[in-house]
Structures are given as structure tokens and as C-alpha cells.
Image (cartoon, rainbow, N blue to C red):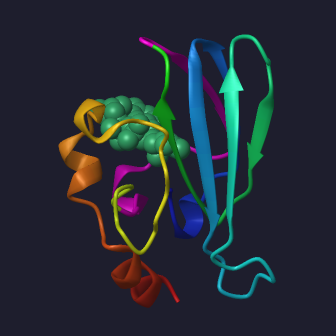
Amino acid sequence: MQKGNYAQAKLVRVIKGRVKDVLVDVRPDSPSFKQKFEIELSEENKKQLFVPRGFLHGFSVLSEEAIFFYKCDNYYNKISETGVNPLDTQLNIDWGIAQRKKIISQKDIMNNEYEDFLLKNI
Ligand SMILES: Cc1cn([C@H]2C[C@H](O)[C@@H](COP(=O)(O)OP(=O)(O)O[C@H]3O[C@@H](C)C(=O)[C@@H](O)[C@H]3O)O2)c(=O)[nH]c1=O
């Protein structure tokens, strides 16, 4: 997610393949603070998901390949980026992929621990 003046809302969908998409509300003043929302988005179901500003957002690819399509309401700004390691045990998300099949980027794995993120962002 991006923070501050570069916070982004996103409208996302999958135009090829299948993904598991997960949101976490990390707005401290929200009644649904720390609640998660999970949904499958696919070429078949054609669902679109609106990701409000102030939510962590991530997805896992369940098919061999996927094309994930975003519309964002603010510009990309690398230095405003923050996030959480998607495999953090406190975050506790089931990404729907067997342990031995998980492939994850260095950027994602090196991201904040969930507890540190919450301390820094509250
Ligand atoms: C997200 C983004 C990346 N990039 C570039 C930066 C880098 O060279 C390359 C890949 O970027 P990243 O590895 O940061 O992309 P990624 O980790 O896939 O970042 C994204 O994660 C998902 C879950 C989101 O919700 C996005 O908003 C964004 O946070 O693309 C842009 O030029 N514009 C963009 O809007």
C-alpha cells in the first residue's frame, strides 16, 4: 500500500487465470480495524474488487499464470510504499498455496512484520 498524500484506492480484477485476493483494514479509527476480507477473483467469475485507501492489499496466484488488472486513484510513488510480509504469522493469512509451491519476492518477504507495521502506522 501507499501512505500519506500518495494513498491509493484501487479497483482490481483478473483478466487471465485465478487469484486469491486479501484485504486487511489497517485504518486505526475504523470499526473494522484489523479485519480481513478474502475473495477469489478470476477470468471466469469476472468479479471486481474495490480496495479503499488505508487497506493492505495482496494476492496469490492460484493458476499457472494470471493477469491482474488495476485502476488506481493516485500516482505510483515508490517512497510512499509500505507493507507487511504476507507470510507473517501474526497476519495469519491462508494464501491457498501449499508450502512447497510458494514463490514469493524478496521485496515481499523483507517487508515489515505485522506488529511493527501497526506500531509505526498508528
Ligand atoms: C505498483 C507499481 C509498480 N511499478 C514498478 C516498480 C517495479 O519496478 C515494478 C514492480 O513493482 P512492485 O514489485 O513494487 O509491485 P508489487 O509488489 O506487485 O506492488 C503492488 O502490490 C500489489 C499487491 C498492490 O496492491 C499494488 O498497489 C502494489 O502495491 O513495477 C510501477 O511502475 N508502477 C506501479 O504502480
Count of numbered circles on the image: 0
Identify the residue shown where x is 42% and y is 90%. 119
Identify the residue shown where x is 24% and y is 48%. 107
Image quadrant where residue 72 sits: top right
Query: Does 88 sit above or below residue 77?
Result: below
Measured as percent of width and height from the top left, residue 78 is found at 36, 50
Measured as percent of width and height from the top left, residue 5 is found at 57, 65
Whether 79 is among the magenta residues is yes
**Span highlighted in magenta in the image:** 64-84
Whether 26 is among the magenta residues is no
* Residue 76 at least partly seen: no
Query: Does 62 sit above or below residue 115?
Result: above
Residue 97 shown left or right of residue 52 in the figure: left
* Residue 84 at least partly seen: yes
Q: Please tell me in which quarter of the rendered image ligand 1 is found.
A: top left
Most foreground residue, 83 or 7? 83
Query: Does 81 sit above or below residue 95?
Result: below
Identify the residue shown where x is 58% and y is 36%. 20
Most foreground residue, 45 or 110? 45
Measured as percent of width and height from the top left, residue 121 is found at 48, 83
Measured as percent of width and height from the top left, residue 95 is found at 47, 44
Residue 28 shown left or right of residue 116 in the figure: right
Identify the residue shown where x is 68% and y is 71%. 35
